[in-house]
Amino acid sequence: MTAILGLTARQLAGSRRVWLVLALVSLPVLAGVLFRVADSTTTSAEFADGITASLIASGILPLVMLLFATSAFGSELGDRTLSYLVLKPLPRWRIVAPKLFASVLVGGLPVALSGALAVAIIENGNARAAAATGVGLLLGAFAYAATFTWAGLATRHALIFGLIYVFIWEAVLAAYLDGIRFLSVRQFTLAVVAGLNSERLDTLDLSLGASAGVVGACIVIVAFSALTVRKLTRIDVP
Amino acid sequence: MTTRPAEIFDLGYRGWEGQRTSRWRRRHAIWRDGVRISLGLGRGVGAKFASWVLIGLALVPMVVLVVISAFLSPAQEAADEFELPSYADYYDWALVPLSLFAAVVAPLLLCPDRRDGVLALYAARPITSTDYVGSLWTAFLTVCGAAAWLPVLVLFTWNALDASSPDSWLRDNWDIAPRSMGAAAAVAVPLTTLSLLAASFTKRRAYAAVATLAVLLVGSAVGGIAEDSFKGAVADVLSLASLSEVATDTVRWLFADEPQTPPRPGWATALWLAGVTLFMAVWLLQRTRQLVRE
Amino acid sequence: MNGAQPTIVVDSVSRWFAGVVAVSGVSLEIEPGVTALLGPNGAGKTTLLRAIAGLIGTSQGKVSIFGEPVRGNPSLYRRIGYMTEHESVYDFLTGRQFVDLNARLQGVEDLENAVARAIETVDLVGAQHRRLHEYSRGMRQRMRLAATLVHDPPLLLLDEPLSGTDPVQRLHLQDVIRDLGAQGRTIVVSSHILEEIDQLADRIHLMVSGKLAASGDYRAIRQQLNDRPFLVRIDSSKARELAAGLLAMEVLESVEIDREGHLRVRSRDVAALQRALPSVAARLDIRLFRVEPLDDSLESVFEYLATGSAT
């Protein structure tokens, strides 16, 4: 399994992608520094919440995970190298799991770390707040990874569906229709952050409790991972 | 058997010595191809899916609103309560599907050529890299610009028809037509340039799409945070990072609407937008020259 | 052939994709040794091989390898090596890393030696530390073959393994494949290029338009096609008289004299022709310089079956 993990990590961390991700994950940190340095109209809590919710959880995290997780299988299908993995005496979950972990390792972990670091800077070294942010974002990264990995294997239009999910479903509809809050990875992420540190995200109106967030994220991870394994068993490998 | 004196000449390859078409015909050919790719024409349903869904999302809401308004107009009270969006307001929504459209479809013009190694074929023809990328840029702008302009045209037409005296309304409001074209350009030109620039950096469409959206989204988030959390010069400078806000502010300026962020005059915002777009265009040109040479 | 169970059993397999029937009702058995799967492009060879390997499912029929079903049975892959028709590899890896990756995923013990052996077999020891994107097509093919046999599988399925190789590399690979077959493995090689195969394979299966058109030794197949007369060229001192003499004996269908004055005759019964020829030549005092069957080759069999027309 480590062989596939290493292989996928190398596949995903191609040079240009690394620059893009580095540019993106540096933004929250830069914002944090700017907050310390410049004159601000908001409290540190509000600013930290804004960065976490609007910049990272709504923008950077889903984009980065979309980029990496859809490529985990998507590039194997497009390059026709999937057969090298499938024609091996490995149970299919031992092919899916490392792919999932690799996209979290290369994409989700840097984002979670940058979020934690940014909050630490903004909140003046508040370790609990930083840790809560990092853990919540990491869990969200796993949930996105599971969903988009499945999409990358199941359809050629993974990117479109992912984009519609993130930018229309989560962004627009969730703002207007209450029921959807239960079906939004972004909400799960934020709920977990708020749950681990009750001072975080106070300024936001979250309708989901922390335990619901954890349960929701775990259901998404397990369900989509299972779907990916099932798809890999049935797919026509190019 | 006797041998007859005879010879067969092997002519081999001969270049074409007949009439060649003009440079404009070549540009037109690439332009036409670009438009077809942008609309997914000539390929299967899947290819059309992204383009038509996203263009639809830009256009359909306006059509729906106009239809609702048409139904309500006989009932005076209801009509008064139901307000159609202003021209500039509509772009606040339309920018979302148009950005997605540019991010996802524009890479189709450049990335497959790079991926399949076809650029060398273009380079071996009498087509300059400027013509190549210029024609593709124009092609995508044609489609994106049309998608940006059509909803406003629908609204304009409805407003004209719904006025008590269409003739005098048109005389008073004729300037909306050129303004709306300017607004469509203010939205479509930067989106086209940005997405093609992103596409010129990678062979994979997915990465280009995410890069474009990253610039737009993250810029927008930065602008939002700047507005909420900072004041003065810092807020002003940071809000320039949001390309989408800069574009919608320019649109408002063009329609002589109230700008949402008063910190700078409308013409300054428009100038910034033009400058950034020009910078991206030059970069795109330079990048294409590099690629064709590869 | 010994009485042991055949390695691969294909039982009435059909596979269609959205209105195109790629493989239609194919049944065959494959035993140890080298077997060739032949056919023109689009005949369904790759689809059949992929169905055998379990990469795709069948629309109808069953495939079993070593007595077990393939699809959904990954543990079987320990005993199978499959080389796809696609030349794509993980470009960023070196040749050795690529073979090593495949060996690890196969769970090979004694990794170092197995990888070294595989790379030696394909004669790429010198280039093994260069990245795959620097390799030529032929080198890439060979390294892919090394990755396919690194785990020492008793069954090898090779889809167009010789494509992209130059004549020297091709000869070398043919030797490799022949040796592997001689070791008692089961090897299935697919190709649409006949010269590659007729030196290699003991048995062939010929596919045309998704169906199995013929199976067996290709010479024997030719014999079976007895609705098509054999074409034989005869160089002699007196062509026309020989022709007249042979025609009188009712062993010939037709006679032709080509531009150089040689005789080309068609006959359904080669054995009778073989008996008649020397006696006619002796009686008429004609010297025979050359007697050559012109369509006893794989090409002509192939062409006949593939195009359905007689030349």
Image (spheres, coloured by chain):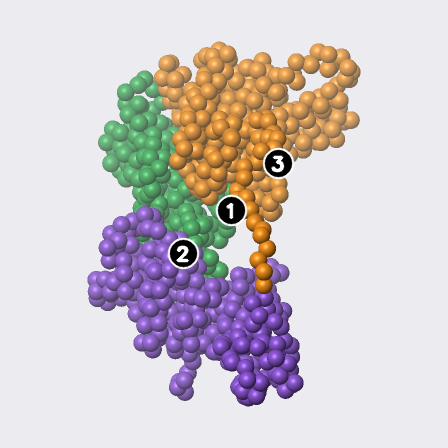
What number is the disc on residue B56?
3
Give the vertical position of C225 relative to C52 (above or below). below
Q: What is the chain letter for disc 1?
A: A
**SS at mark 3?**
helix
Q: Give the spatial CA distance, label 1 vs label 3.
A: 18 Å
**SS at mark 1?**
loop
Q: What is the chain letter for disc 3?
A: B
Would you name the residue on which mark 1 appears? A157
Q: Residue at x 32, y 47 (%)?
A: C134
What number is the disc on residue A121?
none
Q: Which chain is orange?
A: B
Nearest the eye: C152 or B174:
C152
Q: Nearer the viewer, mark 2 or mark 1?
A: 2
- Judged left or right of residue C279, residue A116 is left
Query: How far from the left and from the top, in percent, is residue C254?
Result: 64, 77
Would you name the residue on which mark 2 appears? C164
**SS at mark 2?**
loop
Which amino acid, mark 2? Answer: Gly
Displayed quadrant of residue C247:
bottom right
Give the vertical position of B263 relative to A208 (above or below). above
Determine if marks 2 and 3 fall on one subunit.
no
Say whether marks 1 and 3 touch (CB < 8 Å): no
Q: Which chain is green?
A: A
Does residue B224 show up? no
Q: Colour of chain C?
A: purple
Displayed quadrant of residue C141:
bottom left
